[in-house]
Amino acid sequence: MSTRGNIKSWAIWIVAAVFYLYELALRVAPSVMTDSLMESFGATSTMLGVLISFYYYSYTILQLPCGVIVDRLGPRNLIGLSTLLCVVGTAIFASAGAIHLAQIGRFMVGAGSACAFVSCLQIAASLFPKKYFVILVGITNMMGTMGGLLGGYPVARLVNEIGWRNTMCWLAAVGIIIVGLVFIVIPNKTREYASPDKKSSSSIADIISLIKNWQVVLPSIISGFMYLTISVFAELWVVPFFIAKYDIGNELASSAAACVFVGVAVGSLVLAAYARKIRSYVSTIRMSAGLTAILFLMLIYIPFGFYVSLVVVFAIGFLTGAQAINFTCAKNSTSPETAGTTIAFSNCIVMLIGAIFQPTLGVILDYFWNSAVGNDGVRIYDAACYSCAMLVIPVFLIGAYVLSFYLKETIHMEHEQS
């Protein structure tokens, strides 16, 4: 690939990654405004969990269509229109007077976000040598977690200054700028810059073959279980958990979410490089799942001080960075021509698991609720409630550890240049 092509490839990927960063910020933002949302809509924790998970319902449903469209048509129009959908959905969410309208807005944001991760990795698979794919997955994951970081403390500060509705309006405005960047920088077909001149053959038959391919399904399930530390913990319940446990405000509690996301950002790169150094994706995934489960149990049951807990959640985030390696295992188990569809299928399973467990923890919280209510009528959940609910996460991390023993090593397949 020429120097000029290299620069153009990086420019295309960076703009796609900025959109991924943006949609992660939108995904995470409600986690620092849970009390405000519950007060505005008169919601319980179960209702809040369902509201937030509306993002995942549309996101999950649209994963496979997005994968096929990206493989066949290229990402520019798809990313541009998806960003617009995020903008409109965010505006509806911000102006909703009833919870069902907020659900519609959240559903639209999820639909608009569906192609973000898939497009980034499809561009990486198309424009860069195959041996660098796992590193680019790590960098993409890092960009996403930086979006999660921006959706934490900065959004919490804005919420406290101007209210959650005005904050969401500002986030919608940022999306309009990204739309312009997408149509200026990204060509409609990125494959024209790739070394191999191959057309996508994604079809229903390809999707069926993915469903039958255990070495695609298995890393996807493992990835989903490992991603619970982000989709359930960091994106929704970590802030109220820290508020209840340490009796602090949402700004300070949002630093816990920030520590998780910073950890993921660092771990995504370090563990991807580590996996290549030891030439084993499977060992890295297994080690990370097992250690994360142990750290989570320590966080729940050992009475750490606030700042020690921040170190623990950073370590949890760091180890969760290995979660993205599962996408490389899945992609390596299929043909290069269906890279977008494979990644979308894998991400569909990951997001489906998140969609199931976000409201599940809300249900558990309501089950263990001790009937305490604040002056504003919002239910108060104590640290014991959260500890019972959070136990779900290490249980499934242990499940990921066990399943990793059935995962085949694919790193030896990367000696060829794509």
Image: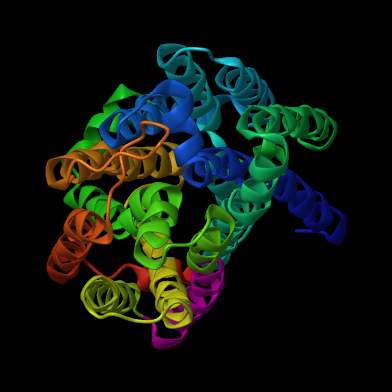
Q: Position of residue 356 (x, y in %)?
A: 24, 37
At horizontal 14% and vertical 47% (from top left) the residue drawn is 368
Q: Position of residue 417 (x, y in %)?
A: 55, 63
Residue at the extreme front of the image, as rendered = 375
Pick whichever, 210 or 366, lies toward us. Answer: 366
Q: Image check: 337 left or right of 191?
A: left
Pick whichever, 92 or 332, lies toward us. Answer: 92
**In the rendered picture of this protein, how many numbered marks are placed on residues?**
0
Q: Image check: 374 left or right of 93?
A: left
Determine whether 214 is above or below 322 in the image: above
In the rendered structure, does residue 271 fall within the stretch colored magenta?
yes
- Please name the colour scheme applied to the rendered image: rainbow
Residue at the extreme bottom of the image, as rendered = 278
Is residue 196 visible in this depiction of the protein? no
Q: Please state the extent of the stretch shown in magenta in the rendering.
A: 262-279
Name the main secondary structure of what is drawn in magenta. Answer: helix
Q: Position of residue 355 (x, y in %)?
A: 30, 36
Q: Image check: 372 left or right of 124?
A: left
In the rendered structure, does residue 382 fall within the stretch colored magenta?
no
Determine whether 79 is above or below 92 in the image: below
Locate the N terminus and report the quarter of the image it occupies: bottom right
At horizontal 68% and vertical 52% (from top left) the residue drawn is 154
At horizontal 51% and vertical 35% (from top left) the residue drawn is 36
Q: Position of residue 397 (x, y in %)?
A: 21, 64
At horizontal 52% and vertical 12% (from top left) the residue drawn is 97
Determine whether 365 is above or below 51 in the image: below
Is residue 410 visible in this depiction of the protein? yes
Locate the C terminus and report the quarter of the image it occupies: bottom right
Q: Quadrant of residue 211?
A: top left
